[in-house]
Image (cartoon, rainbow, N blue to C red):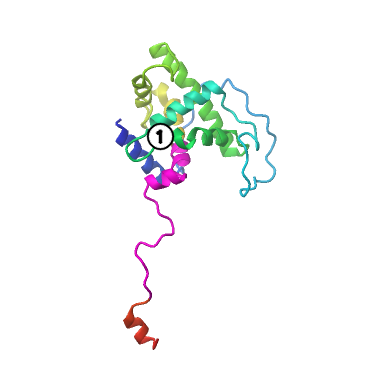
Amino acid sequence: MTQLDRRTAMKWVLAAGAAAQLPDFAFAAATTEPPSVRGYGKDPNMLKTYAAGELWPLTLNDAQRRTARALCDLIIPADEFSPAATAVATDQFIDEWISAPYPVCKRDRDIVMRGLEWLDAESQRRYQHPFVDGVPEHAARICDDICNAPPKAPELAGATAFFARFRELTATGYYTTPIGMKDLRYTGNEPLVAFNGPPAEVLKKLGL
């Protein structure tokens, strides 16, 4: 996969949305404990600015955050038009998302945690170092094997499902920021042409 292919794919993912159902996750159970949040009560006040971890305990530790950052930037790297994913804190968005107590976030938390654990284990198996500690080509080769469905081998089904969901979360976090929207050339409620009023023939017909 080239950088252009990856970036173009991210735009397609965002346009298509995250409605597709993921296949059953085929990893062993996660080794980390879920955050100690019981229920979620009222939704947060979206007009208030919260500090990281203020609403609920965050999930990723330093090592997991490093792995998540590396994967985010591998999915959306910097190019001549826009910065890489972590330049707009996409990894922090993912950490907040998987830490939230809502049902879909809890499901994604399990997928992401097991996937990050798998990346390090697979990198150790292939190259004898963690996912983030080798040359970038090593991480890219691992991702090349899990970036497309159907999986290349049955034992990669869980990793392929993880990568699909992590890619969706990365795209969602990135392309909902002002920088990401600019990269998509999204202009929102801006007129395509200047409006100079109704045409003269319409005003004449209306007697105005």
Residue 147 coordinates in the image, percent (x, y): 37, 30
- Front residue of 115/80: it is 80
Where the N terminus falls, by quadrant? top left
User: Does residue 123 belong to the magenta stretch?
Assistant: no
The quadrant in which residue 159 appears is top left
Q: Which residue is mark 1?
A: 84
User: Does residue 179 belong to the magenta stretch?
Assistant: yes
Count of marks, rendered view: 1
Residue 26, visible in the rendered structure: no
Q: Residue at x 63, y 40 (%)?
A: 50
Q: Residue at x 35, y 86 (%)?
A: 205
Element under label 1?
loop
Q: Residue furthest bottom?
A: 207
Q: Looking at the picture, does residue 182 appear above or below residue 140?
A: below
Q: Is residue 5 left or right of residue 56?
A: left
- Front residue of 47/97: it is 47
- Front residue of 151/195: it is 195
Q: Looking at the picture, does residue 64 appear above or below residue 43?
A: above
Residue 187 coordinates in the image, percent (x, y): 40, 54
Residue 54, visible in the rendered structure: yes
Q: Looking at the picture, does residue 204 appear above or below residue 2?
A: below
Where the C terminus falls, by quadrant? bottom left
Residue 107 coordinates in the image, percent (x, y): 56, 34
Q: Looking at the picture, does residue 97 appear above or below residue 70?
A: below
The kind of residue on which mark 1 rests is Ala
Q: Residue at x 32, y 38 (%)?
A: 80
| Segment colored magenta | 168-197
Residue 26 coordinates in the image, percent (x, y): 48, 25
> Label 1 crowding class (10 Å Cα cut-off): few <14, some 14-19, many 20+?
some
